[in-house]
Image: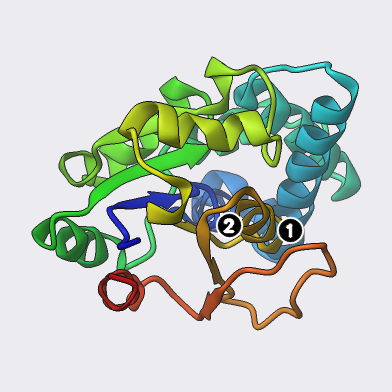
Amino acid sequence: MPITTCIFDAYGTLFDVAAAARRAAAEPDHAALAERWPALAAAWRARQLQYTWLRAITGAHANFGQVTGEALDWALEAQGLAGDAGLRARLMALYRELDAYPEVPAMLEALKRAGKATAILSNGSPDMLTDAVEAAGIGALLDDLLSVESVGVYKPHPSVYDLVGRRFGCDRSEVLFVSSNGWDAGAAAGYGFVSAWVNRAGDPVDRLPWRPAHVLTDLAGIPHLAEMLA
């Protein structure tokens, strides 16, 4: 079946998760981050994902804002920056307005011109997603922001992917699902979506029971891929 619906993960896919630490490090008040922001950003992201998986497995759900803050607390302590309340507050604020990758607006515009439905499907809470989309100026290019909060469990639980069909009334085979997380793209493929992994770092494919059908280095090729699959 042709692709009618293009669904995007948010954090790391449309939005650069390292942007908060990078921007804070450039501010005079946070000079302590100048040398340490890449390590902080990497640790923050790794713990954030790990905490979502652990909460999903154990049934101990908490919203993504809380999980993001807990992961940041761990990362700050690991970098010897625990106790700097001003830095923590600034990083959490910047996380709500992460930079979109440069190709995102043109890519979404091309999909809309082609008549595709577009949406985010994210671990993010609705308020966080709304803030990020508004800061990036891409709200008019998205038909919906789908959050795991409506099912109370994080990806890759199948009930999260169920939200797409429930919202758009489409068959799984009509969905092009795009994520920068290899595990997410793989799980989406196992669910029945046509999945594309945006592998910006050139990482190996995750050793999971399922593999994404397509691998790209950025999002610029998504409109062409969606048309090819028609």
Which residue is at a point 68% across and 59% down the rendered structure image?
Answer: 37
Which mark is first along the chain, 1 or 2? Answer: 2
Q: Residue at x 65, y 62 (%)?
A: 34
Q: Residue at x 82, y 42 (%)?
A: 50
Residue 18 bears which disc, if any? 2
All told, the count of numbered labels is 2
> Marks 1 and 2: in contact by CB < 8 Å?
yes
The correct choice, above or below, for 171 with respect to 148 in the image is below
Percent across and percent down for residue 126 are 44, 22
At mark 1, the secondary structure is helix
Task: Give above or below for 12 relative to 48.
Answer: below
Task: Give the residue type that dot 1 points to.
Answer: Ala
Image quadrant of residue 158?
top right
Q: Left or right? Give the position of 188 relative to 207.
A: left
Closer to the camera in the image, 97 or 200? 200
CA distance for labels 2 and 1: 7 Å
Q: Would residue 83 appear left or right of 168 to someone viewing this image? A: right
Residue in the image at 83% along x and 18% along y: 59
Residue sitting nearer the eye, 170 or 183: 170
Quadrant where the N terminus sits is bottom left
Q: What's the residue type where badge 2 is placed?
A: Ala
Q: Is residue 88 visible?
A: no
- Identify the image quadrant of residue 143: top left
Is any part of residue 121 visible from this angle?
A: yes
Q: Position of residue 123 (x, y in %)?
A: 59, 34
The C terminus lies in which quarter of the figure? bottom left
Nearest the viewer among 144 and 170 is 170
Left or right for 91, reference 205: left
x and y percent of residue 141 in the render? 19, 47
Q: Is residue 178 above or below residue 160?
A: below
Label 1 sits on residue: 42
Give the percent coordinates (x, y) of residue 11: 53, 48
